[in-house]
Amino acid sequence: MWVHLKAVLENEKSVQLLVTLADACICVGHWPKQFKDSVLVIIPKPGKPTYSTPKLFRPIVLLNTMGKPIENMISNRLQFDMIKYDLVHPNQAGGVCQRSTEDAGLFLT
């Protein structure tokens, strides 16, 4: 749970171990099966008279708590390197760090 993860990450040595694990995932090119585990929870949409069709439900996927921060760390590193080595098209702004709405407007003009 997040409460437990926050308590563990208050220790600097634990943070360093998490970074080492992320580095190992990148170097080896392997994402552990334990981080791929997920739980699907179905939540009914409020105010619907009947729940006979699937589109009346909201599926929510809950991922492994420990895998999320590592995945986010790897994603941020990859985006940083993609921008650093000019691997992202200049007009690509959506979902890319260090690219804002102002950047997109400047590209259009």
Image (cartoon, grey):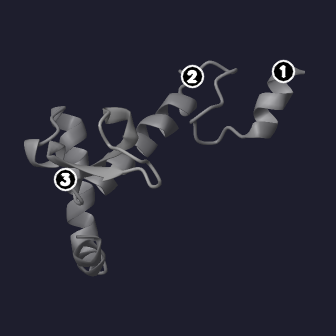
The amino acid sitting under disc 1 is Leu
**Where in the figure is residue 52, as x and y percent of width and height?**
29, 37
**Where in the figure is residue 15, as x and y percent of width and height?**
28, 68
Q: Quadrant of the N terminus?
A: bottom left
Who comes first in sequence, dot 1 or dot 2?
A: 2
Dot 1 and dot 3 residues touching (CB under 8 Å): no
Q: Residue at x 84, y 21 (%)?
A: 108
**Where in the figure is residue 73, as x and y percent of width and height?**
37, 50
Residue where numbered disc 2 is placed: 88
Say what secondary structure mark 3 lies in. helix
Say what secondary structure mark 2 lies in. loop
Drawn side of residue 27 relative to residue 33, left or right: right
Who comes first in sequence, dot 2 or dot 3?
A: 3
Dot 1 and dot 2 residues touching (CB under 8 Å): no
Residue where numbered disc 3 is placed: 21
Q: Which mark is residue 108?
A: 1
Q: Residues within 10 Å of mark 1 (few under 14, many from 20)?
A: few
Q: Residue at x 57, y 22 (%)?
A: 88
Give the vertical position of 8 relative to 50 (above or below).
below
The amino acid sitting under disc 3 is Leu
- Tag nearer the camera, 1 or 3: 1
Who comes first in sequence, dot 1 or dot 3?
A: 3
Q: Quadrant of the C terminus?
A: top right
The amino acid sitting under disc 2 is Val
Q: CA distance from mark 1 to mark 3?
A: 41 Å
Query: On the image, which quarter does residue 84 sit in?
Result: top right
Question: Please, which residue is most extreme toward the front here?
Answer: 49
Q: Residues within 10 Å of mark 2 (few under 14, many from 20)?
A: some
Q: CA distance from mark 2 to mark 3?
A: 27 Å
Of residues 37 and 42, the one drawn nearer to the viewer in this rendering = 42
